[in-house]
């Protein structure tokens, strides 16, 4: 059942001429719980560090707006530009290091899961340099919890400052709270709705609009301080108890009430099936084997939402090891697996400036249909193959395959050898033949990267 090449393609970041494929299910799982070596090699600053860039920019902008002299305004403008430039440079480094992690990791399953859960808990900044804070959010709220209990991951993501900013939770106030009565401010239901619909129970879950409203009232204390850090504001809390899915919360009016409802939502049977289904779709096919979903759901319920147990069920089911590749790679997967197969030297990307990274990675991804860490809504990127297979998007992949490898490697590999490297022992004969018959190396490489076989995992 287990196949090392299938493991690296379907559950990892693609075949590499340098990094051996995992040799067992246990090796895939061990990569999740051991030291995060690739994160140490290519570090990305956590949100708590990046937050100080945000506050520096905001302080400079306030000084610029309040300046009473031309000289003071000039100095404030310079400080604002300096903060913005520093944040943009940090952002470019995050893009590079995210791609390099996928290119050089010996635990591709960890990288894929970090991406999956970051997409499941989509959050991004909506203005100024907060737009560059997604990678720090992932580093702080997502990556440490991908092999733990789902409830801990849920709490870390839902209460994170970037999530509160993204879903306008900081503006939500209980109508009958001290602040609500004084300023006539009201609830914002965005976070409560997305927690139920996207993060836990699912769009068809067993909840009503009344549950959403009650959960929003329970969430009212979740907010930010003036420095953009998390703060639970008791003045925002709606007095009294709230009833969510038939259970009462909120007697204390404290953060522990929010944690309690999130843990209960995480342990709900509907959440177990929703999470299992999404994982199965992501790693196998748009319409997963029903028995695979059942086994993963059972593993979730029996373990109290231990994600490692869910992955064990996923990796030990025959449906996960069918040789046919059925999912279309998203643009980030297509580019990252291409870099990995090409064995792109990390030092080359490390020397790339922001403009080069945009030209090589960010802009091509956008043309392929996936803006860097910026899905259209909180539901993240579509899983359905049909979304990614359009003439425009596929033409963009072909254009990248023709141009990018020459910029990424001074000497391209032999195309016939590259076909084996990129696609493994089951490389389609027609792809190997086309690669060997190409007039030159760059055309042969492009034929392999643009082939239907390479587009799938």
Image: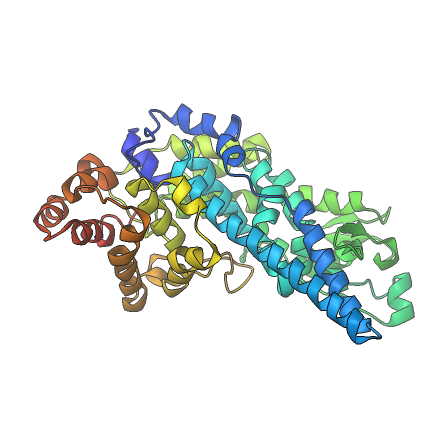
Residue at figure coordinates x 19%, y 42% from the top left: 419
Front residue (pair 53, 152)? 53
How far across and down, in percent of the image, does residue 61 sit? 74, 67
Looking at the image, can residue 287 be seen?
Answer: no
Looking at the image, can residue 244 be seen?
Answer: yes
How far across and down, in percent of the image, does residue 49 sit? 68, 46
Residue 238 occupies quadrant = bottom right
How far across and down, in percent of the image, does residue 316 sit? 38, 30
Q: Quadrant of the C terminus?
A: top left
Residue farthest toward the front in the current orientation of the protein = 71
Residue 398 to residue 1: above or below: below
Front residue (pair 153, 430)? 430
Colour setting: rainbow
Q: Quadrant of the N terminus?
A: top left
Residue 316 to residue 46: above or below: above
Q: Is residue 12 left or right of residue 31?
A: left
Residue at figure coordinates x 55%, y 31% from the top left: 302
Residue 402 to residue 113: above or below: below
Front residue (pair 454, 290)? 454
Residue at figure coordinates x 46%, y 34% from the top left: 311
Tally of numbered tags: 0
Q: Is residue 292 left or right of residue 92?
A: left
How far across and down, in percent of the image, does residue 241 sit? 83, 52
Q: Is residue 202 left or right of residue 255?
A: left
């Amino acid at each position: 059942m287990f196949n090392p090449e299938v493991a690296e393609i379907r559950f990892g970041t693609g075949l590499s001429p340098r990094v051996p494929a995992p040799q067992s299910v246990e090796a895939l799982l061990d990569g999740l719980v051991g030291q995060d070596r690739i994160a140490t090699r290519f570090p990305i600053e956590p949100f708590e560090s990046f937050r100080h860039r945000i506050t520096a920019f905001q302080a400079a902008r306030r000084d610029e707006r309040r300046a009473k002299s031309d000289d003071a305004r000039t100095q404030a403008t310079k400080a604002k530009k300096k903060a913005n430039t520093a944040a943009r440079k940090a952002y470019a480094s995050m893009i590079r290091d995210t791609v390099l992690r996928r290119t050089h990791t010996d635990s591709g399953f960890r990288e894929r899961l970090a991406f999956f859960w970051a997409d499941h808990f989509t959050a991004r900044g909506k203005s100024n340099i907060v737009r560059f804070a997604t990678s720090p959010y992932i580093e702080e709220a997502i990556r440490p919890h991908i092999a733990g209990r789902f409830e801990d991951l849920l709490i870390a993501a839902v209460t994170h400052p970037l999530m509160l900013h993204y879903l306008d939770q900081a503006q939500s106030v209980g109508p009958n709270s001290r602040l609500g009565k004084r300023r006539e401010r009201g609830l914002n239901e965005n976070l409560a709705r997305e927690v139920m619909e996207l993060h836990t129970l699912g769009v068809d879950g067993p909840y009503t609009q009344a549950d959403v409203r009650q959960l929003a009232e329970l969430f009212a204390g979740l907010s930010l301080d003036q420095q953009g850090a998390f703060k639970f504001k008791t003045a925002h809390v709606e007095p009294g108890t709230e009833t969510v899915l038939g259970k009462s919360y909120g007697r204390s009016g404290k953060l522990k009430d929010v944690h309690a409802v999130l843990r209960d939502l995480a342990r709900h049977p509907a959440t177990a099936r929703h999470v299992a289904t999404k994982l199965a779709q992501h790693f196998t096919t748009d319409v997963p084997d029903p028995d695979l979903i059942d086994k993963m759901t059972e593993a979730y319920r029996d373990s109290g939402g231990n994600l490692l147990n869910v992955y064990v069920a996923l990796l030990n089911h025959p449906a996960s090891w069918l040789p046919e590749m059925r999912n279309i790679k998203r643009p980030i997967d297509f580019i990252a697996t291409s870099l990995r197969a090409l064995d792109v030297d990390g030092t080359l990307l490390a020397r790339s400036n922001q403009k080069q990274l945009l030209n090589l990675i960010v802009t091509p991804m956008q043309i392929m249909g996936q803006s860097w860490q910026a899905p259209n809504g909180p539901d993240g990127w579509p899983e359905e193959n049909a979304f990614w297979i359009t003439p425009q998007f596929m033409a963009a992949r072909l254009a990248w395959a023709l141009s990018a490898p020459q910029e990424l490697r001074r000497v391209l590999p032999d195309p016939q050898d590259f076909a084996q490297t990129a696609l493994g022992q089951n490389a389609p004969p027609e792809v190997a033949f086309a690669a060997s018959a190409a007039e030159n190396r760059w055309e042969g490489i492009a034929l392999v990267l643009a082939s239907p076989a390479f587009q799938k995992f």
